[in-house]
Image (cartoon, helix red, strand yellow):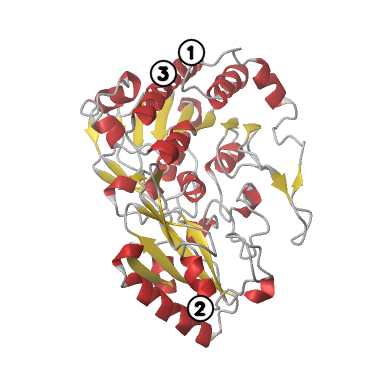
């Protein structure tokens, strides 16, 4: 049963971007020194793995973590928005008004709880976050036809919070530490929120460059373990009964090849390119019949006109031919209905989703080689059933069972679990909370 208002503990929810659960559950086998995270196995309740959403990307996953529903319901289908003309790169889902359902912070605020956020994706302009340092866009457009206008605007709330938090940064940050950790400490200690979100992103960045379980990734996670310890210590100084929830958005796979299907689309005149174009030529809106929306280990295929049966058949034939070539590393091709049944890519123009085998990733080039070898690095965005792409869930605190292994859980169960602890309700979330009580 949810706790009464007077009994509700503070909840600190920390996301460690890109952390596979076996970083922790098999930490000794990987020779990792992460005592804080490893302690959750004995002192708390945890999952062996969390099956995520389609695609297994940062923004859709983080939105599921705070809504309890799939991307097809909450509306955040990828990190970057579909950009068929490639005129607005990095035009991502920054703004909360793109979310179609209620979030945890909105439910908490409506229940009279204080809320705060540092770095959580899709929180620009969020209502219900009293103190917020969101992940911020590098630019915004004044209209769909404009080039990006780089901004000097700050998106913090209240205004000036980022400047205050920056003043608390150390002159020299230890290796593997990031600003968001210090901002999180500052916001937590200054405002003492009932519900706080912190997103730590450096592990993901490192894995993209060097792959999971690389020497560099391991050292970054060890630094994050120290950051988590300090955040927990600061939270317990505010409320000794606080519940600590550690999550991640997706796992990771080593990356070996990038596949530019757009080259084949251009060769087949599904995308018309002017002569002597660069690899990422900015096509005119009228010059494509089908375009690709690369999302790492998956790639959505969208039709300019969803009723164009000729273009649909041409795309289907092209994809089936590509899938028959083992060099392209295509695991399967999902129909629109199959993709939506998995909870992703509900854009009305979406016709197919290409799912890559682990080690392959979709690229965005329209000219040049189709297959580009990758010397080192990692990727995500694959279908959620791959264990390597499973994400993490650990929690501990007053009223949380110790040493409980939940096995495999669904990512959509996490938000209802946190909602129950906070004593609030997410009406769109349909899955039950996990069994965390003793």
Q: Residue 237 got which mark?
A: 1
The reply to whether residue 437 is visible in this rendering is no
Foreground of the two, 221 or 13: 221
Residue drawn at (60%, 51%) of the image: 93
Q: Nearer the viewer, mark 3 or mark 2?
A: 2
Q: Secondary structure at mark 3?
A: helix
Left or right relative to 354: residue 133: right
Residue drawn at (39%, 22%) of the image: 225
Q: Quadrant of the N terminus?
A: top left
Q: Is residue 161 above or below residue 433?
A: above
Image coordinates for residue 88, horizontal then vertical, percent:
67, 55
Instruction: Tell whether label 2 touches label 1 (CB within 8 Å).
Output: no
Give the residue furthest to the front: 276
Q: Is residue 83 above or below residue 324?
A: above
Foreground of the two, 348 or 304: 304
Q: Residue 226 got which mark?
A: 3
- On the image, numbered disc 2 is attached to which residue? 268
The reply to whether residue 230 is visible in this rendering is yes
Instruction: Tell whether label 2 touches label 3 (CB within 8 Å).
Output: no
């Amino acid at each position: 049963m949810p706790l009464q208002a007077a009994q509700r503990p503070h909840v600190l929810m920390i996301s460690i971007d890109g952390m596979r659960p076996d970083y922790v559950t098999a930490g000794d086998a990987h020779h990792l020194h992460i005592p804080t995270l490893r302690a959750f196995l004995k002192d708390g309740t945890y999952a062996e793995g969390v099956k995520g959403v389609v695609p297994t990307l940062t923004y859709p996953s983080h939105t599921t973590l705070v809504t309890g529903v799939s991307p097809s319901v909450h509306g955040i289908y990828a990190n970057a928005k579909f950009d068929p003309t490639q005129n607005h790169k990095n035009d991502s889902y920054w703004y909360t008004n793109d979310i179609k359902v209620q979030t945890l912070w909105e439910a908490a605020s409506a229940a009279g709880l204080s809320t705060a956020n540092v770095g959580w994706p899709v929180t620009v302009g969020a209502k219900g976050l009293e103190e917020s340092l969101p992940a911020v866009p590098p630019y915004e457009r004044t209209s769909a036809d404009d080039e990006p206008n780089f901004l000097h605007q700050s998106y913090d709330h209240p205004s000036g919070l980022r400047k205050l938090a920056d003043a608390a940064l150390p002159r020299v940050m230890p290796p593997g530490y990031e600003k968001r950790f210090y901002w999180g400490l500052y916001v937590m200690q200054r405002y003492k929120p009932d519900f706080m979100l912190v997103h730590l992103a450096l592990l993901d960045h490192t894995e993209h460059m060097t792959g999971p379980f690389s020497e560099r990734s391991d050292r970054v996670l060890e630094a994050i373990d120290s950051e988590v310890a300090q955040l927990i210590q600061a939270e317990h100084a505010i409320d000794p009964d606080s519940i600590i929830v550690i999550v991640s958005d997706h796992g990771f796979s080593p990356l070996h090849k990038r596949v530019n299907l757009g080259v084949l689309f251009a060769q087949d005149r599904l995308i018309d390119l002017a002569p002597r174009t660069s690899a990422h030529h900015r096509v005119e809106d009228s010059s494509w019949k089908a375009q690709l929306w690369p999302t790492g280990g998956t790639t959505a295929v969208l039709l300019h006109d969803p009723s164009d049966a000729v273009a649909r058949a041409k795309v289907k034939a092209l994809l089936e031919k590509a899938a028959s070539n083992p060099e392209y590393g295509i695991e399967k091709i999902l129909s629109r209905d199959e993709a939506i049944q998995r909870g992703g890519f509900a854009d009305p123009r979406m016709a197919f989703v290409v799912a890559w085998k682990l080690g392959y990733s979709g690229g965005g080039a329209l000219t040049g080689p189709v297959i580009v070898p990758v010397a080192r690095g990692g990727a995500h965005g694959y279908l959620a059933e791959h264990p390597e792409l499973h994400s993490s869930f650990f929690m501990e605190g007053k009223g949380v069972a110790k040493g409980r292994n939940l096995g495999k859980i669904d990512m959509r169960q996490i938000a209802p679990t946190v909602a129950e602890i906070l004593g609030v309700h997410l009406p769109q979330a349909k899955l039950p909370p996990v069994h965390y009580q003793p």
